[in-house]
Every structure is written in structure tokens, then in C-alpha cells.
Amino acid sequence: VQLQASGGGSVQAGESLRLSCTYSGSSASYPPINWYRQTPGNQRDFVAAIGGSGMTLYAPSVEGRFTIGRADAKNTVFLQMNDLKPEDTAVYYCNSAGQYGQGTLVTVSS
């Protein structure tokens, strides 16, 4: 599976961003897709996931602020991030079937 994350940028605390993950090469119509994030010197941390059935799962730190879903565009999963906090600053990656795509940087300033 090949994946590409996009939509990152620089925002102020309390603002929103919408990330997109475009994927290809999956044999499944709706493959499970995960979002992870990483800050310098730290491991990648789980953020959110959507299963083939549409079931979703969130890290406690983003529950209620972030929403993962399948976009109308084919082979695209979004991560809607609301009420962003400085601690959300990281490079965000999408993941599926053990593969990571190129990340997108999110910077939140206070």
C-alpha cells in the first residue's frame, strides 16, 4: 500500500486543520487506515484509526477534538482536527498494512 499525507500547516491554538491521506495499492475496498504523529526525538504515537467497517478509535489526548473519516474522494481518509493545541504540533503520518507514507507537518502556536 502506498500512502501520502497532506494538509498540514501552521495555525494558532484553537484553530482547525483537515489532513488527508490518499492511498493506493490496497486490495480492500476500505482498508483500515491509521494516523500517527511524531515529534523530534520521540517515537510515533497513535492518533486515530478507522477500520474497514467504519469503526473508529482515538487516542485519549485527541478524543472529542479530532475526527477520522472516509472522504467523498476515492481512496482518501481525512483527519479533521479542531481546537488544536500546541502539544498537537508534530509530523503526522498515515499508516496501513504496516506501511507509512510521507508525513505532513502540523505546527500549532499559542
Image (tube, rainbow, N blue to C red):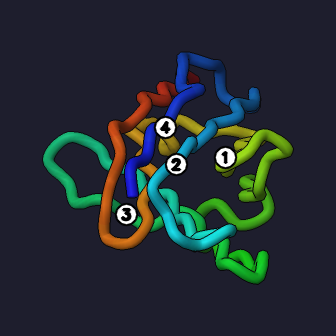
Which quadrant holds residue 72? top right
Residue lying furthest left: 41
Residue 23 tag number: 2
N-term-proximal mark, 3 vs 2: 2
Is 58 or 26 nearer to us in this picture?
26
Residue 5 tag number: 4
Tell me the crowding category of disc 1: few under 14, some 14 to 19, or many 20 or more residues within 10 angstroms, Cα based. Answer: some
Residue 45 tag number: 3
- Secondary element at tag 4: strand
Tell me the crowding category of disc 2: few under 14, some 14 to 19, or many 20 or more residues within 10 angstroms, Cα based. Answer: many
Frontmost of labels 4 and 1 is 1
Which quadrant holds residue 44? bottom left
Frontmost of labels 4 and 2 is 2
Q: Callout 1, which amino acid?
A: Thr
- Secondary element at tag 1: strand
Q: Position of residue 53 (x, y in %)?
A: 76, 82
Q: What is the CA distance from the residue labelled 4 to the residue labelled 1? A: 10 Å
Q: What is the CA distance from the residue labelled 1 to the residue labelled 3? A: 21 Å
Residue 104 tag number: none
Q: Is residue 59 visible?
A: no
Q: What is the CA distance from the residue labelled 4 to the residue labelled 2? A: 9 Å
Residue position for label 1:
76
CB under 8 Å between discs 1 and 2: yes
> Could you tell me which residue is drawn at 50 percent across and 49 percent down?
24
> Could you tell me which residue is drawn at 48 percent across and 25 percent down?
107
Q: Is residue 32 above or below residue 92?
A: below
CB under 8 Å between discs 4 and 2: no
Q: Position of residue 40 (x, y in %)?
A: 20, 40
- Secondary element at tag 2: strand
Query: Which image quarter holds the N terminus?
Result: bottom left
> Could you tell me which residue is drawn at 32 percent across and 49 percent down?
38
Tell me the crowding category of disc 3: few under 14, some 14 to 19, or many 20 or more residues within 10 angstroms, Cα based. Answer: some
